[in-house]
């Protein structure tokens, strides 16, 4: 399931609307000069004496870090690896202390090495980064020697002005500087957004591309986010912006780079696909090029000009290294490195000095696990410790107790145990008449960012849920809405889980107790939700009756492909999703009677 953003806390803080896009124009001018001309190490390729005709350039890449500086907890911190005997093993991975070590080790002996990312470096972040508007993550990426990244949809969670601040530096407009005497410096790598323009002027919001140079070797990077970003970010986050077709945009700028003599081009695309296996070492070129992968990236790859030599992708949080044929029918490398810094991709681009182009037939690529049994990078440990001290007073407060892991992000089932807890918390908090009179609650699956893990993350003790852990599950701090919907609109909304924009990749809403129905995956489109099985507290939904329905403001705006939920009337704005979640944990658990994982018996699935 792809990551599904909602509003981050700060987009609700009153930022001067007039300042909206004013500061963003400075982005292009203020781009760090060093970012375009950074190479790691020295050397002139292979051999001695005269320069050889070709030189191998190492491209290291990753995507969808989402501010996960510390190793992600529970099943969300594992990668799947298929063993020689066919069994699948879960390997704990990720954390920037290990990612830094992995990247630095990989660069050794590679005089030409460039590091690029596929977007969603920030946003939907755990408390350690999210509490500080992701300044800690930008600082970590600077230390990682990231050369360039595309923007992802989550880079827009707090709007264009905040994205400009992450690039250019400066203290937060509302909260100021977090450390005494220290001003936030911003990213020393360029954020690229070739397909995002300002509505008023039609001009690009950020640089569309950058050129990495070393000893005469030149590689152009074009960065785009998915065209559908406005459908999965709150209206506030994308106000005044236009998002354009990925293929047309990349082809346009590839022609421009080509005219400037830059023949080697890599596209960084925050859009992805779904391989047939979740194992990172699955061969998705079996039996033929790109046969084992589906999703939006396949059509995008097939449409991008052959001038582009490789595609680094993201968004779907999947791991793959495939070749997909370009418009001329030649295979071209398409990669994605899972999420949360659990993998990195190492691609060899053989650069021909005579043609200034990549020898496409010799491009090699593989994903590697960022294992946790290697030494930690001491500078990253210091960074994490420094920010943890600032976060500790808030992060370590106990909110409740659990008797075992309650899986959310790590669950692949349509109905997730943690989804049930969150929906029940929303219903309970908003059911009183003066709080909205909710009868049912819906939670979008992409908004559940982690699992609740029984094992202690720090010194709090096993089974204790801290504020930091609860925040990591629900980092957007969305305000809750209760609205009137007819029974007919309710049924339509449930059918929109598996039809329209969600048909190819269903988004199954998590539902509060009392709502039951059958999901028949042997059928297609809207028919997969069996209408006459939908019941609330044992009674069939009455199409003509009005129901009070609770959901976060993102869903209430029709986000995630649920226009029917956006039709609600008589809206009451309630507490935030995080506050209701924490209140529910406090009311339903204690040290002696911890909350157990709930049964998942609301949605009957026919496979």
Image (cartoon, helix red, strand yellow):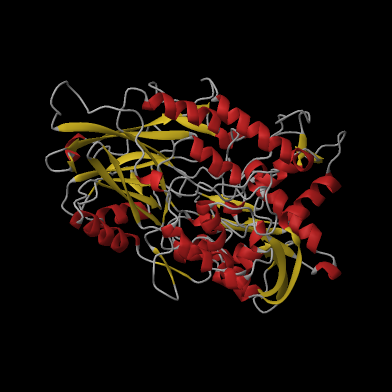
Looking at the image, which is closer to me, 199 or 125? 199
Identity of the residue drawn at 43% across and 27% down: 104
Image quarter of residue 234: bottom right
Identity of the residue drawn at 64% across and 40% down: 451
User: Where residue 379 appears, x then y in whole percent?
Assistant: 56, 28
- Up-down: is 558 above or below 371? below
Looking at the image, which is closer to me, 319 or 104? 104
Image quarter of residue 441: bottom right
User: Where residue 428 appears, x then y in whole percent?
Assistant: 80, 58
Is there any visible trace of residue 328 in the rendered image?
Answer: yes
User: Where residue 540 appears, x then y in whole percent?
Assistant: 68, 67
Looking at the image, which is closer to me, 389 or 409? 389
User: Where residue 299 appears, x then y in whole percent?
Assistant: 30, 56
Is there any visible trace of residue 539 in the rendered image?
Answer: no
- Up-down: is 57 above or below 163? above
- Name the side, left or right, on which 251 lies relative to 268: left
- Name the side, left or right, on which 555 lies relative to 248: right
- Up-down: is 292 above or below 279? below
Instruction: Give the farthest residue toward the front.
Output: 181
Image quarter of residue 213: top left
Q: Total marks drawn?
A: 0
- Up-down: is 95 above or below 237? above
Identity of the residue drawn at 32% across and 22% down: 109
């Amino acid at each position: 399931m792809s990551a599904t953003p909602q509003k981050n806390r700060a987009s609700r803080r009153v930022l001067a609307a007039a300042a909206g896009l004013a500061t963003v124009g400075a982005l292009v001018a203020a781009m760090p000069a060093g970012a375009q001309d950074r190479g790691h190490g020295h050397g002139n390729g292979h051999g001695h004496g005269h320069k050889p005709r070709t030189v191998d350039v190492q491209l290291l890449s990753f995507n969808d870090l989402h501010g996960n500086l510390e190793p992600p907890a529970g099943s969300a911190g594992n990668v799947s690896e298929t063993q020689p005997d066919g069994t699948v093993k879960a390997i704990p991975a990720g954390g920037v202390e290990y990612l830094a070590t992995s990247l630095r080790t990989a660069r050794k002996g590679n005089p030409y090495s460039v590091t690029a990312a596929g977007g969603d470096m920030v946003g939907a972040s755990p408390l350690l980064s999210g509490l500080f508007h992701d300044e800690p993550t930008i600082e970590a990426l600077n230390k990682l020697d990231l050369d360039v990244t595309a923007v992802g949809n989550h880079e827009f969670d707090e709007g264009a002005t905040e994205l400009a601040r992450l690039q250019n530096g400066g203290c937060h407009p509302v909260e100021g500087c977090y450390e005494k005497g220290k001003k936030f410096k911003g990213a020393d790598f360029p954020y690229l957004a070739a397909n995002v323009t300002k509505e008023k002027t039609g001009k690009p919001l950020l640089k569309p591309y950058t050129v990495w140079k070393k000893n005469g070797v030149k590689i152009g990077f074009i960065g785009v986010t998915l065209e559908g970003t406005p459908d999965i970010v709150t209206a506030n986050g994308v106000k005044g912006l236009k998002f354009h077709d990925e293929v047309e945009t990349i082809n346009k700028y590839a022609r421009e780079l080509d005219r400037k003599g830059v023949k080697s081009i890599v596209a960084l695309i925050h859009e992805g696909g779904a391989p047939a296996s979740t194992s990172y070492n699955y061969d998705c070129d079996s039996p033929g090029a790109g046969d084992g992968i589906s999703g939006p990236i396949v059509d995008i790859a097939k449409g991008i000009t052959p001038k582009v030599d490789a595609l680094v992708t993201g968004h779907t949080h999947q791991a793959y290294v495939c070749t997909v044929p370009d418009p001329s029918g030649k295979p071209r490398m398409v990669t994605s490195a899972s999420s949360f810094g659990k993998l990195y991709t190492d691609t060899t681009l053989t650069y021909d000095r005579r043609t200034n182009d990549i020898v496409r037939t010799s491009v090699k690529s593989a994903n590697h696990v960022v294992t946790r049994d290697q030494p930690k990078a001491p500078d990253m440990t210091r960074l994490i410790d420094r920010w943890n001290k600032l976060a500790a007073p808030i992060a370590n407060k106990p909110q409740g107790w659990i008797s075992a892991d309650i899986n959310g992000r790590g669950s692949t089932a349509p109905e997730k145990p943690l989804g049930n807890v969150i929906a029940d918390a929303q219903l309970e908090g908003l059911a009183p008449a003066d709080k909205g009179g909710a009868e049912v609650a819906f939670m979008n699956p992409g908004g559940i960012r982690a699992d609740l893990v029984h094992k202690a993350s720090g010194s709090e003790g096993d089974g204790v849920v801290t504020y930091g852990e609860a925040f990591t599950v629900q980092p957007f701090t969305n305000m809750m809405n209760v609205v009137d919907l007819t029974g007919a609109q309710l049924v339509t909304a449930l059918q929109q889980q598996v039809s329209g924009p969600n048909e190819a990749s269903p988004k199954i809403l998590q539902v509060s107790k009392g709502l039951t129905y059958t999901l028949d995956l042997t059928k297609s489109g809207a028919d997969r939700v069996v209408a006459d099985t939908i019941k609330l507290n044992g009674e069939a939904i009455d199409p003509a009756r009005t129901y009070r329905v609770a959901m976060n403001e993102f869903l209430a705006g029709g986000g995630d492909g649920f226009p029917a939920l956006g039709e609600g009337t008589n809206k009451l704005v309630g507490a935030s999703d995080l506050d209701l979640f924490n209140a529910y944990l406090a009311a339903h658990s204690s040290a002696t009677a911890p909350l157990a994982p709930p049964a998942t018996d609301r949605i009957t699935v026919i496979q």
